Image (cartoon, grey):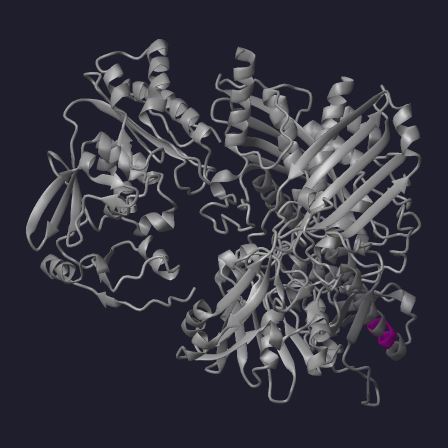
Amino acid sequence: MAVVHNFEYYKPLKLAETLKLLKKYGDKAKLLAGGTDLAVFIKEGVLFPEAVIDIKHVKELQKLELKKDGLFVGAQASFSDILESANIKKDYLLLWESARSVASVGIRNRATLVGNICSAVPSLDSGPALLCYDAVVHLASTKGEREVPISEWFLAPRRTAMKPDEIVTGVFIPKPKIKNAGCYLKLGRYGGEDLAQAGLGVFVNDKLEYKLAYCAVGPVPKRAAKIEKLLKGKALSTVLIAKAMSLVPEEIAPIADIRSGKEYRIHMCKIMLERGLEVCTERMKGKIIDTLRILGG
Amino acid sequence: MNKYKFVGKPIVRIDGREKVSGAAIYGDDIDFGPNLLYAEIVESTEAHAIIKSIDTSEAEKVEGVFKVFTGKDFPYKFGLYMKDRYIFAQDKVRFVGEQVAAVIGRTPQAAKKGAQLVKVEYKPLPVVTNQMDALKKDSVLLHPDLGEYPHVPWFFPKPKTNVAHWRKTRKGDLEKGFKEADLVFEDEYFVPRYAHCAIETHVAIGKYDLGGRLTVWSSSQSPHTQRHLFAEALAPMGLTHKDVRVIAPHVGGGFGGKAGVTMEIIPAALATKLKGYAVKLRWTRQQEFVNTYQRLGVVAKLKVGVKKDGTITALDHKIYWDAGAYVEYGANVVNAVGLSAIGPYRIPNVSIDSVCVYTNLPPGGAYRGFGYSEMLFGLESHMTQIAHKLGMDEVKFRLKNAIKEGDKTAYGADMNPNGLLECIEKVAKEIDWGKKIVSKDPKKAIGKGFSLFWKAPAMPPNASSSAFLKFNEDASINLIISGMDIGQGYQTVMAQIAAEVLSVPPSKIRVETPDTDRNPYEWQTVASHITWSSGNAVKKAAIDAKEQILALVERVFVIPKDQLYLEDEAVKCTTRKNFNLPLRDFVVNGIMTEDGTFKGGPINARGMFLPEFSSANSDPETSQGGHPNVHYTVGAGALILEVDKDTGKMHVIKAVEAIDAGQAINPDLIKGQITGGLLQGLATVLYEDMRYDEKGKLLNPNFTDYKIPTAMDVPDEIVPIIVEVPQPDGPFGARGIGEHTMLPAAPMIANAVEDAIGIRIKSMPFTAEKVAMAMLNLKNKKGK
């Protein structure tokens, strides 16, 4: 498909240079990392940026860093980079499973996690995992650096707390301090790559603290605070899970669209909660479970 | 079976290495040099409207825009079976996406930019997107001039309505049949539209050279038919058939979508006004969805009468087709099914109404299965339902009523030899029919589904194939034919047929993609007729070559021809053990005799096949009297389906399909067809979900929201079974199987879902959402 729109293309090698360009162009510039959204939008005539700033060669935006206190996912880290790390799979299984559910191998090789949260579509798979891990978004501009907790990041569909002259340098994910288990359940229309009809991240630790976050069933990905409160400190039982499932409609605000009806989304968010909690309980006991076909199909 | 040396053997595809390695050249790969122009289409944004004005002035100002054309430049109609389609919309548009104008650019960018600046002013007309609405008396008419459209004699349009064709088939006494029945059961079934989704989108390049001849390179299943339709439509430009040449490179999938002529007419026509240049048009994926053909949508009303012992006494089958804005090809889908909607059953009293209805949706046309998938979804769902109502096992019910050789088809001709009973029995055994499987997982339910299928090639009675065969010095062969290898393995199978006759291995036979200037006539690569029809032509060409060879040897060596035979690339003799004349010694340069003179010369052979027994002449009110279908290919399928009771998600644990190929020329290729066809069929029932808004705009012309299966969606196990009851007039007994492999998928799933969870779903597709919501509704009802 021919690209009709003309734009300036920049390939900065340093962060400082990138920030200067951002200051100059503001929201008339678009950052290019994986390009899996941007290239398509330019081709299809959805976006008409004056400048495209390619950040693939900016040295400071390193890929992945596993530190003692947590994981730093740099702006250039692709979902494949995350999937290839055995340590991430071991310590951040919920994040790893959400990365695995993104699109297809070819897209995952290009698409970045940071790009995913900057696109901020309601169905973003990385959202629930980052919310459950209480991740922190690191931003930079010519004015300096700042940090935004992920819970304050998503404002509306395709809108985030980022300012036009800012760049996300990476996301920090604190390492859970005590024994824990997590899983990401994604509802799609078939076994191949799909945008989530609904997604749910589930996290449990030894103190019976539960963290739950949904995506694709509201304008932004969101923690299910009421259910978390209900479950806190309690061991799971059939009765308790049923009570939690009954709270689901209060936690989500799904729409009907081409991917799913509203009723099915509500129904499935309950089923996903039930199965997600079951998986985490089993994983806490040390059982190895593959969640790939946990919803059937 | 060891009857044959090359036929019936799993020969590796002769075009495989070229395609797998990327060496194969497709339409978009061809380099046309710096004089290549690019066309970009201005598409209708309205589903039904009068074109008030077209302003091209801004587009013409764009740098790099070469020219802009509209309907005024090409006031010509075209069509395969009915001339109801235009090269560009004239006064009216009839679907969203229809071509209104073309901008020609020096670069694709210039053309696209120009197309964005063409202003079209429309006066909207009422839009009808549903065939049942279009049938209503007060519906807006899509084609007020329908009565004037030229069409084939076996179509029956109803002028001043939206009915483009009405195929009526009547046999026996319907009323009497229902009276004889102990049980009469009626129901309705719904099948939406589908898209082919070939990996290669349509592409065609037209070039009208300075000498005044038109060449079109086209990704096509039908090079000769395209040449014919181009010559017909462009006759006012002074073109005749000999002036039009179609070159068809490799094709990246067809499935019926590249049959006939759709977008290819555009660059063919544009070229005639761009003398000396080549002009390319390549569809985007979105255009591929809306402006080629789509599979037609169906509302089917079924009424079947049965006796207590399971004997079917009567069938009343009414099928209403949403055929879209233009039906030049799609009306023949309606016709084919109208002749065959009894399915593979022996039914004495029959009424079929197959009604082709214009709607303001994209044109319907050929799609693998040619209407039979849509028809069989209803029929085979219905047969299972009625067997259950009788308290009879559905496989026993099918065995009792299955059509046999000599039984009468709906139009009164004799059914051909077939192995339907063998197919049913083999499938039932392989799937362990009658044995219920209980899932170990309490969240899952498991069911089995069964379905029969049949299909005949739908083609004019005079559709023909031909072949040229020439020997080279080393006794290798160029087999020159005009069918297309669209994945089925056509080139390999034709080489095997020639190889068998001539004792030359397929590896020494080259088959290329066709050029209508050099390759002999072939109607189209459609209808699953190519193995049978082109195979017959190739076999005749090979026999012609063999006859020439043996006649020459007889003349030179004075050995009676009946004592000569071909073996291992040599002529041998039954009476002279040591006689061994290698083909390479003489098939081009002749045989030297004692006086130094040579006899013979290059062996060039030809073959042709036309089914001379076929006829479309029949009574329009009953369809009795003709022989419209050459034969039917039959089969049976079954599967084991696991359903998640909460999520509605389904997983095929095992699928079995048996098909009567007559004679498998290449069993590996048939197994490939069964796997691929089954998956394509499963996709239509489980995933593909085409959505239009009320204004006729397709909402998901992309793979983000129109899902076709991936490697993650293949059944755990697929068992292909080949049955071989020879087709008397087929090459070595072969008949076609390509389309058939997808036919039973949807009813198998429908029947398995009911077996698993007790819910009968009657509208496709069966998305997980639909199944889950049906279960939830049932639960809620029971709760009350």
Horizontal arrangement in the rendering, residue A61 relative to residue B29 (left or right): left
Q: Would you say residue B550 sits in the magenta stretch?
A: yes
| Percent of width and height locating residue A108 | 33, 47
- Regarding residue B722, the answer to whether it shows in the image is no
Asked whether, in this view, residue B5 is left or right of residue B191, the answer is right
Which quadrant: the C terminus of chain B?
top right
Task: Please provide percent x and percent y for residue B307.
Answer: 86, 22
Number of marks present in the image shown? 0
Indicate whether residue B558 is drawn in magenta. no
* Residue B127 in sight in this render: yes
Pinpoint residue B84: horizontal percent, then vertical percent: 71, 62
- The residue closer to the viewer here, B498 or A194, is A194
Tell me where residue B300 sits by quadrant.
top right
Residue under the point 35% across and 36% down? A216
Where does residue A141 sit, x and y in percent of width and height?
A: 10, 53
- The one nearer the camera, B193 or B130, is B130
Q: Which residues are magenta?
A: B549-553
Q: Identify the main secondary structure in magenta.
A: helix
Residue in the foreground of this view, choosing between A241 and B660: A241
Q: Does A200 sit above or below residue B37?
A: above
- Of residue B294 and residue A262, the one placed in the foreground of this image is A262
In screen coordinates, is B80 left or right of B610? left
In the picture, residue B519 is in which quadrant?
bottom right
Against B215, residue B344 (above or below) is above
